[in-house]
Image (tube, coloured by chain):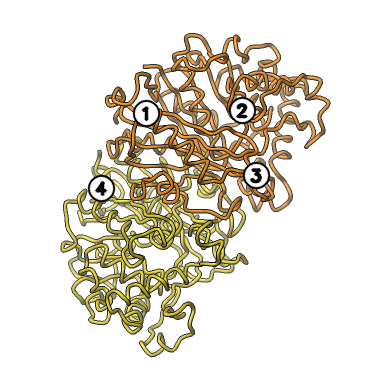
Chain colours: A orange, B yellow
Amino acid sequence: MREVAIVGVGMTHFGELWNDSLRGMFAEAASGAMADAGVDHLDGLYVGNMAAGQFVGQEHLGPLMASQIGMAGIPATRVESACASGGAALRAAYIEVASGMSDLVMAAGVEKMNDGADVTQVLATAADQELEAYHGATFPALYALIARAHMATYGTTEEDLAWVSVKNHHHGAMNPKAQFRREVTVEQVLGSSKVAEPLRLLHCSPVSDGAAAVLLCPLDQAARYTKRPVKILGTGLATASLSLADRKSPAILDAVKDSAVHAYKMAGVGPGDIQVAEVHDCFAIAEICCIEALGLVEQGKGGAAARDGLTALGGKIPVNTSGGLKSKGHPVGATGIAQAIEIVEQLRGLSGDRQVQGAEIGLAQNMGGSGASSVVHIFGRV
Amino acid sequence: MREVAIVGVGMTHFGELWNDSLRGMFAEAASGAMADAGVDHLDGLYVGNMAAGQFVGQEHLGPLMASQIGMAGIPATRVESACASGGAALRAAYIEVASGMSDLVMAAGVEKMNDGADVTQVLATAADQELEAYHGATFPALYALIARAHMATYGTTEEDLAWVSVKNHHHGAMNPKAQFRREVTVEQVLGSSKVAEPLRLLHCSPVSDGAAAVLLCPLDQAARYTKRPVKILGTGLATASLSLADRKSPAILDAVKDSAVHAYKMAGVGPGDIQVAEVHDCFAIAEICCIEALGLVEQGKGGAAARDGLTALGGKIPVNTSGGLKSKGHPVGATGIAQAIEIVEQLRGLSGDRQVQGAEIGLAQNMGGSGASSVVHIFGRV
């Protein structure tokens, strides 16, 4: 397999973009990535999207988006793994370039959630319809169960959860693309309205519109397009049962663990080598479970990580320097690509106030459902 | 890139399977393919599905279906390209095995269309929502426009269209998996009710449930699993604008042409080498346009092909020996995989009454929307 680099990135603002369409946002992000790499053609395109069919009545995004950016004709396919659709699209593009089949391939993600659909019900179709969604379990409820299990097993507190939000809003306040560019306090989080106990409004990522795109090519061609290529060192994708009830413990995310094991092995690095990470904080408890499953902290110690400053900028292992899904926003199909962009920009040294000084190896972890699918990519400065 | 073989196939009956669920049908097809190859594990899974989110409220089919067949944990991703989702899943699996990343990968497709959804409206989300679907254009109407353009340009007649249905029902009557195992006459087709002029009920493929699965591995490992491996000689995927109005001529399917060019080039063969083909006859006119775009007949001569017996069993180039989408059924996400199975079985010499004697090279062409995406695979007997 060939070595693969990312040579261009582009994304829209994330937020309630009432005046922007699905295809318009996609074109903005894609053309941004193409301009970043100075290219006017692509050999292939993978579009990560969870549910545009349900959100805005539009399936078949491969050819639609290829045409939209003036590339009608090229191979273009949509990839879906719920909220991990972006990560899955990146992995598909990686495999295609690594295989030798194509040279210049875009992985992009897009989601238009603010357009009138019943968002919580649409998202619930990523849960097990027969065992969960049909009976009324939506994701706030499922993650509340995960939080309760983590609290019961490891003594994690509501304040621990709040610190995840405080940290990510602190980071997001410095991100010009973020949906919420403002700080929140522990008191504000703990005083916000209850969504599904113990989760409150400020523990939850928002409903967002947005798109993000990255451009991949063989590492040995990267110098044609950029002075700052970033190498993909490893990829891992793993799954677990869709329904929470079918897992050994709701507080342990086996798919995240397994996807990390694959990616670490392929990259030839371990958790201790990661200097900056984007992880899937759709709810505050998810960040806690994910950093444990990734091995960034010991199992059961995730609750203390944000509170103790370990995962903040300046801490031992900064997590979600972009603001994470909580503050940057979570247009579900775009999230996995936006995470990769944050790590690429960190390794390029272009993250401004959010820069992790000297970062050479970073990780992005993108998750679907209540952890039924997880994609991990590890990136390295060239 | 490594050479890749198909070493196992499995599929359900196609039809109105009111008592079968999405996951149940998938498991039946997948376990059939695994039994055919004598394996009890997979290294990866791609699920082709167009719109289970809209049809039955279930996205995130990768992990769901991996768990369903006892393989929770493995990398599993859904791939969507409308009615070409099955073909796109096969191509993704091919690339993953060819790349060297994984050895034993399943490509499977599934669709549950008979479960209460407004099927024509759901399918229309594969058309351009802003330029077509929103304004009331559904696929029968779009293919009627294609038919009118073909008639005006090449003199194709309603009777030509009828002969496609007659031929495919003749083939399907011999296929134990087909939805409609009965012959129809030209008179019956031309006397059936109008759907969208000039298309009548018996020019249209039905609403179907079903699943199909194939198992891929490196060619040099194929002997472990089967005495009759079939090699994938070439793959091509191409796109065109989603909306018909944005194309030069509605009667010419550029994506089909382009996908065929790629696949022929990779396989090192031409249209004259193909001995049996499955093409995407969602409407009778589609088969006519596709055999022209694939180069199996001259441009403009597709109308006469079925009428003259050229594409029937025993003809120069038998097309849709399975019965095609028209008679075998068209559970949209499963169709591309079922087409591949028909060609694999033909090259294995296991097609019974439908056998094309001595077939060594075959082609499967799967299409999305009104031709906005097309996937071609060429297979060879080992």
Please give left or right for residue B25 compared with residue A310 in the image. left
Q: Residue at x 51, y 67 (%)?
A: B137
Q: Residue at x 27, y 58 (%)?
A: B257
Taking A22 as reference, is B201 above or below it? below
Q: Are marks 2 and 1 on the same chain?
A: yes
Q: Amino acid at mark 3?
A: Asn
Label 2 sits on residue: A178
Taking B157 as reference, is A136 above or below it? above
Task: Give the secondary structure at mark 3.
Answer: loop
Q: Residue A374 appears at what percent x and percent y? A: 53, 34
Label 3 sits on residue: A114
Q: Residue B116 appears at what percent x and percent y? A: 62, 67
Q: Are marks 3 and 4 on the same chain?
A: no
Q: Amino acid at mark 2?
A: Ala
Callout 3: chain: A
Of B380 and B87, nearer the camera is: B87
Please give left or right for residue B327 compared with residue A140 in the image. left
Q: Residue A58 appears at what percent x and percent y? A: 53, 54
